[in-house]
Image (cartoon, rainbow, N blue to C red):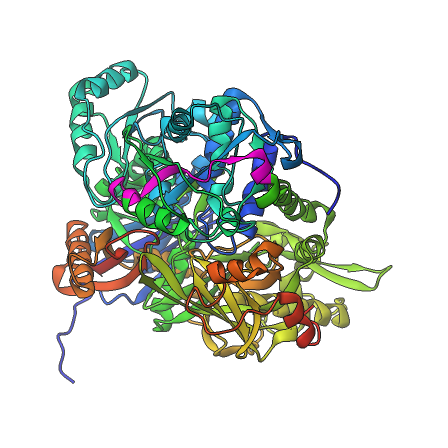
Amino acid sequence: MSYTNVNSMNEIYRIGIDVGGTNTDAALLDSKLNTIHTIKVHTTRDVNEGITESIRRLLAESSVNPAQIRYAMLGTTHCTNAIVERKHLGKVGLIRIGAPATTAVPPLADWDDTLKATVCPHAYVVHGGYEYDGRTIVEMDEEEIQDCFLKMKGEVEAVAICGVFSPVNTSQEKRVEELAKQVLGADMPVTLSHEIGSIGLLERENASLLNGALLNVIAGVVKGFEEALQTFGIDASLYICQNDGTLMYSEYALRYPILTIACGPTNSIRGAAHLSGLNDALVVDIGGTTTDIGVLTQGFPRQSSAAVEIGGIRTNFRMPDILSIGIGGGTIVRLDESQDQVTVGPDSVGYELLKRGLIFGGDTLTATDVAVKLGRYEWKDAQTEALNESICKRADEIITRDIEDAIDRMKTSSDPVDVILVGGGSILVADKLEGVSRIVRPDHYDAANAIGAALGEVSGETERIYSLDEMSYDEAKEDARSHAIEQAVLAGADRDTVQIVLSEDIPIAYLPGNALLVKVKAAGRL
Amino acid sequence: MRNFKLTELNEQAIQYIAVGAAVLGTGGGGDPHIGKLMAKEAIRKHGPVRVVSPEDLEDDALVVPISMIGAPTVMNEKIPSIQQMIKPLDMIEKELGRKVSAIMPIEVGGGNSLVPVITAAERNIPIVDADAMGRAFPESQMVTFYLDGIDCSPITMADERGNGVLMHAIDGVWEERMARAVTIQMGGSASICDYPVTGAQVKQSAIPHTLTLAYEIGKTLFESKELKQNPIEMLLKQLNGYALFQGKAVDIRRRTEGGFTRGEAIFEGTDAKKGSTMTLFFQNEFLLATEDGHSMAITPDLISVLDQDTGMPITTENLKYGARVSVVGFPCDPKWRSPKGLETVGPQYFGYDAPYVPIEKLATEKGGAE
């Protein structure tokens, strides 16, 4: 066999870190994307401490020279938590380019009052907007827009701009951005809605506002990550994980923090794909509290088609299609003696499993105790003798049935599918499941999310309405494809490796000229 | 049905009606979400809107339906202006030289159920507890007023720029052609008033108490959660409906024909229906349901797809692979079963070669689809 012998001194490494609610996982991969080492630490109150600790242990235990680490990827729940907890959110001024249309539903109509006051002290609807075919509805009045910015001056930290049918024609949003910079200063961060979401004005407007409100949060994340890496002498390119399974430059993330929402489950799915070598399968990620099931299609997670709520706000930007059920390693098992009935969950002992689980000398019967009692997993020094085998068997039947049922819900046909099991709780699952052709348990299964974070692919996407009276179906798809590819290259992908990973179209009812909404996504390697 | 009648629309009522309207929308009619937000906003500004029962209308009262015509996708992006929701009414009043006493929804299914609320609130006039479909249909002539030969003119339309169009059409079919053409010029979504009618004509031709019906359906689906009861069973009891199928969406084929989304949704049976396949044929709305090739429900009877757990309705646009659903059917208003009704909205009109058989009959033939 003849191949270039890579001297490990010259090897280039990458690290991936996934910050979840309970654990912070880290993984070290080499240039061939082999997993060298993985680490799991508790997520700390100051999230950066957990990140620093995971890097410290990763370096110490792998003995890799920090100078050989060239890429560092971070996936994090910071932004989701900020919205859900309504903390650290910045103030955003909104310009909707829509009047005289759209006045029947003003901005922030479905927001609760506290969030409204926290996030958006200034919202204005100005004249302008486009039709679905890109024609102008009415011209903009630049003085009117400048007046709005003058009113915001000194009271907002960012600006969000959302115009009617801006995904079809971006000119007006871009012009309003120029006006914003003129009045509020060139440094004022501006979010343009067409870069964030798809057709559906209110949902795209909401997503743009949240994006603006998260700019401070993501700036803190990127700064903390940079500092942590510097501490260990790592001089790497920084990437932040997006929720579609691809990466963005940290500079890009600083502008589009909303795209990080829900990247955790996505990272698990991507990691599972890599570890198993499968491109089409269901990924079942069993943690301490929940089981998240996602669908791997051509190496990427299937997207949800419905409007998605984040912290009670309806948005329409892409999200992975995940089904969560309340079963995890720490899920509590109970016996109702009066009815002779065994129940499982939905509550969990969470990260206290090693203290509270019966086999560890604790006081609570958990799903992990059941799995160990039934011989599914050998835990050193586990105390299983006292456990009632019949209760364990009944609990196991419930757990298996619930997981089988959830798997069935995510399938696209009744044909058996391959299932990749990842996450620390995957020991709960028996070796055979109804409707499953093959169960794959890859190595490093409990760090699939961090490995997924480290896998460097960057993407671009496009969503446009075409009139099939003016061009053929193939021409429309081709135009959308080339636009998506350019977007991917802009985001940092190597042009030679860019592939179309998603392509779908939806005919638009009641429109003439055979209007077709086309969505395309392209992704390529770094 | 309880003997309850809506007397006013507040924010809670809007919430319920939006869900009920999606069930009656039979998969089409557009997502009531924007209509709901428009109505809530109007109520916040002007207070609750009065609801008048058709039987309480004066015979010579002028009642005008208002709705949106065009692509729901466009309306979700280019949301209507407030002015646009008043202008067609002003134009009708000017043309007829008299004031409108009340307005009404033209269709209770889908987004148009709540569109009239903003007009009623802005003009401080009541909304009639009735509509002219009892469900959703895709074309303008598919209303009970048309079956009774009521004049659809004058017809008025408006866009958000301030453009208004006044038309006189010889019948509902011509209205559909001309209004559709105007809608395209107005950017794919416009407001429209047609079939200005008298109180007597509402009593004679409209389908009564359908806002109350939508409200009750929505209330049932919300309350079933608190009562821990099966929402679908509660709904079937309430609407004299039939559980047609339980299963999982395995294939959805859509294509555009003549500006409409047509296609088929295919479901594989689960539980009691294991081994069977249901196909739903749709043109925006679900129009024909077959199980293993046998008709189970046919337009104009209502076919709805509900989430198996929550009972919440799923539209054709939102239906996706893997969805676990219950397909349910309800008898339509008897007006639609007349020869003219079937000629207007029966299976042949939509190009399906299944003969119309009432859902009750199909259910007994199958030995009770219940």
Q: In the picture provided, is A301 more to the left or to the right than A4?
A: right
Residue reaching furthest bottom? A1
Residue reaching furthest right? A338
Question: Residue at position x 62%, y 43% from top?
Answer: B208
- Is A419 drawn above or below residue A191 in the view shown? below
**Where residue B359 sits in the image (x, y, percent)?**
62, 66
**Where residue B167 sits in the image (x, y, percent)?**
33, 38
Question: A409 or A451: which is nearer to us?
Answer: A409
Evaluate whether residue B9 shows in this view.
Answer: no
Question: B298 or B274: which is nearer to us?
Answer: B298
Q: Quadrant of the image for the N terminus of chain A?
A: bottom left
Question: Residue A395: which quarter of the image?
Answer: bottom right
Evaluate whether residue B245 shows in this view.
Answer: yes
Q: In the picture provided, is B224 more to the left or to the right than A59?
A: right
Question: Residue B296: which quarter of the image?
Answer: bottom right
Question: Residue at position x 79%, y 63% from top?
Answer: A341
Q: In the picture provided, is A403 more to the left or to the right than B164?
A: right
Question: Residue at position x 68%, y 57% from top?
Answer: B236
**Residue B160 among those drawn in magenta:** no
Q: Quadrant of the image for the C terminus of chain A?
A: bottom left
**Residue B199 among those drawn in magenta:** yes
**Where residue A90 sits in the image (x, y, percent)?**
36, 27
- Is A480 drawn above or below residue A275 in the view shown? above
Disc count in the image?
0
Question: A205 or A10: which is nearer to us?
Answer: A205
Question: Residue B326: which quarter of the image?
Answer: bottom right
- Is A419 drawn above or below residue A116 in the view shown? below
Question: A40 or A151: which is nearer to us?
Answer: A151
**Where residue A31 sits in the image (x, y, percent)?**
22, 64
Question: Residue at position x 37%, y 56% from top?
Answer: A450
In this picture, which residue range is highlighted in magenta? B182-202
